[in-house]
Amino acid sequence: MLEICLDQEGPLSWPLQIYRQIRTAIMAGSLRAGDSLPSTAELARHLAVSEDSVSAAYQWMGAEGLLECRTGASARIRTGVREVHGTGDPVAPLGLWADLPKPPARLTTAPEYDFRAGVPDTHLFPRDTWLRLLAEQLATMPPRLLVYDDPRGHADLRTSIAARLHRSRELRVRAADVLVTNGSQQAVHLVARVLLRPGDRVAVENPGYPPSRQSFTSLGAEPVGVRVDSEGLVVDEIPDDCRLVHVTPAHQFPLGVPMSLRRKLDLLAWARRRGAVIVEDDYDAELKFTERPLEPLHSLSPDGRVIYVGSFSKVLLPMLRLGFLVAPPALMPALAKAKYLTDVCTPSVEQAVLARFLADGGFADHLRALHDEYGARRGLLIDILARDFGDVLTLVPSEAGLHVTARAEHDMWPLVRAARRAGIWLYSLGDFTDPPNSAHGLLFGYGAMSVEAIEEGLRNLRAIHSQKGMK
């Protein structure tokens, strides 16, 4: 008699348990081609279940080609059914993925003093307004927009982004030039997918943003680090054979320096001579703390060699994953295809809510409140660093963003490690250089820190520095 043990307490039905156990026996070779199974009535009596349960299991196996069931005859195991044993090499990714670092581990609890760069204050997010707009959109959006949207993005949001860029960044773009993405990181990746071939060289800032560099590597391109000085990317040091240049000119990451107009014009001229493309990553330029205009590269380039990338992560919520790119018409069809093949489209409801938030003036009001709050934190942070750390750190001038950077003469990693053990989370400048730790300094984010926490955190950091006897 076929051995089948039914689990009286298990969640699976009798037919499913019978089916799985007989199938396992067939795949393992315990039951071979041509072997007969008990009749449904006989097996039902043996297992103390209904005949219908056994019949259902046999029918499922017959439908899968495991059994040959004939009226008035015993069910037989079909030929050609056997288990596949794994004897080959395990599946492995391409070698380049082994060389890329793991994604950063998510902190399970927020640090007591969170000086991480680029982390906004989620308490400042206009939650009530967003929930109201979200409810309205869900109640009023046509059913056709609740399925799959245009991969280029929700039409109203693209229009609102184009209008916002004209007002805030003096960019003359149309809605047709805008493509909505899941954050600025996806925007950079899409551009690379449609423009780069394996082996192409890409100029990236050094120090710079590691995920962008890693994204280029993942596509088989070769990132080449180019030095950054007080005027931004050093154009004269870009290799002649680079096909693409990735820059953060308004608030260079991580140093914070704005690119000078002279250097911008030099970069545009270089790209024109070499037939290269520039990706301008304007990741946090909405948070500007100066009256001096920070003119985008895109506005200086009439020939369409600059692709402009932006994000709402720093001024709204990172988890919303709403970003965008602005590209010339010749590139938009390919970018839309790449976006569709990546994830079809960015969630439509969130796009519609953001479109309303932008069009109704809510975003502008929210941004003014952020400038006031973050401006106060930034000013306090700079004053304390100048007063209490002037013998150790030299502030790098910056005019935008959610962090400031300070250079040092010595390795800051010992201080960073000691600070983290004490609940003070911050980054070393060496975290963003290639090779690692080839420049010394600290990054101080103020997005996630109240004024009181900034004061306490820096006081504790200075105490740790003194206790350790660090230079």
Image (tube, rainbow, N blue to C red):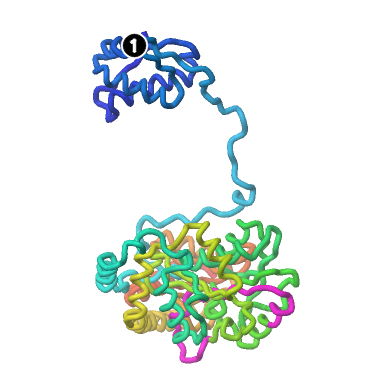
Residue drawn at 28 percent across, 14 percent down = 44
Tell me which segment is drawn in magenta.
269-294
Query: Is residue 42 depicted above or below 157 in this figure?
Result: above
Residue drawn at 63 percent across, 64 percent down = 434
Q: Nearer the viewer, residue 219 or 41?
A: 41
Residue drawn at 61 percent across, 64 percent down = 194
Q: Quadrant of residue 190?
A: bottom right
Q: Position of residue 302 (x, y in %)?
A: 62, 84
- Mark 1 element type: loop
Q: Position of residue 168 (x, y in %)?
A: 45, 85
Q: Is residue 251 magenta?
A: no
For residue 177, side relative to residue 227 (left or right): left
Q: Nearer the viewer, residue 70 or 49?
A: 70
Amino acid type for the residue under numbered disc 1: Ser
What is the residue that sits farthest to the front in this orientation?
71
Q: Nearer the viewer, residue 397 or 240?
A: 240
Residue indicated by mark 1: 39
Q: Quadrant of residue 234?
A: bottom right
